[in-house]
Image: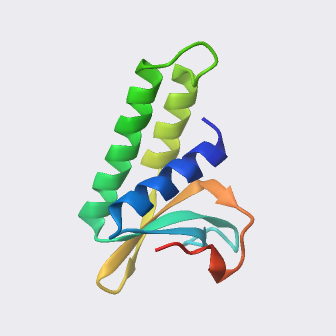
Amino acid sequence: MTKTSVIDRLKEACERDGDIAFRADYSGRNMYGSACVGIVGGRAACQRLIAEVIATAGQDMLDATPGDPTFSEFYALVKDLMGFASDSMGRDAILYFPAVQTEVADASAVCS
């Protein structure tokens, strides 16, 4: 699955959830100004959202027809999502995905 697919899946999941915000412009520790996507909310809720995104992508792969995402693309999505890092944001946390870098540099990329 492409970087765009990972971003789209996370955005859609955040929109459905309502309690977790999507960020397209987070620069975490040791990223030296590079930006990546992240999700903001309670740590357990964010981890649940990641699990739901993986489960949905897995189901999509099982229901696939020729031309749909392959196992290797599914594996890449899982690897990107499970490679998250986290920072505290007050009562919430941000789980961010350094492997899913973006070029967005303004705060208007925040969806909540």
Residue at 51% over, 21% down: 71
Residue most toward the bottom? 90
Residue 11: percent from the left, percent from the top?
A: 51, 58
Residue at 75% over, 65% down: 103
Residue 24 occupies quadrant: bottom right
In the displayed structure, does residue 107 sit left or right of residue 59? right
In the displayed structure, does residue 13 sit left or right of residue 26? left
What quarter of the picture does the N terminus occupy?
top right
In the displayed structure, does residue 2 sit left or right of residue 45? right
Check the image and report above or below for 88 versus 13.
Answer: below
Check the image and report above or below for 26 versus 9.
Answer: below
Residue most toward the left? 44
Residue at 69% over, 61% down: 102
Q: How many marks?
A: 0
In-front residue for pair 98/64? 64
Residue 94 occupies quadrant: bottom left
Residue 72: percent from the left, percent from the top?
A: 56, 23
Coloration mode? rainbow
Residue at 57% over, 25% down: 69
Residue 65: percent from the left, percent from the top?
A: 54, 15
In-front residue for pair 71/98? 71
In the displayed structure, does residue 54 sit left or right of residue 66? left
Check the image and report above or below for 41 versus 53.
Answer: below
Residue 96: percent from the left, percent from the top?
A: 49, 63
Residue most toward the right? 103
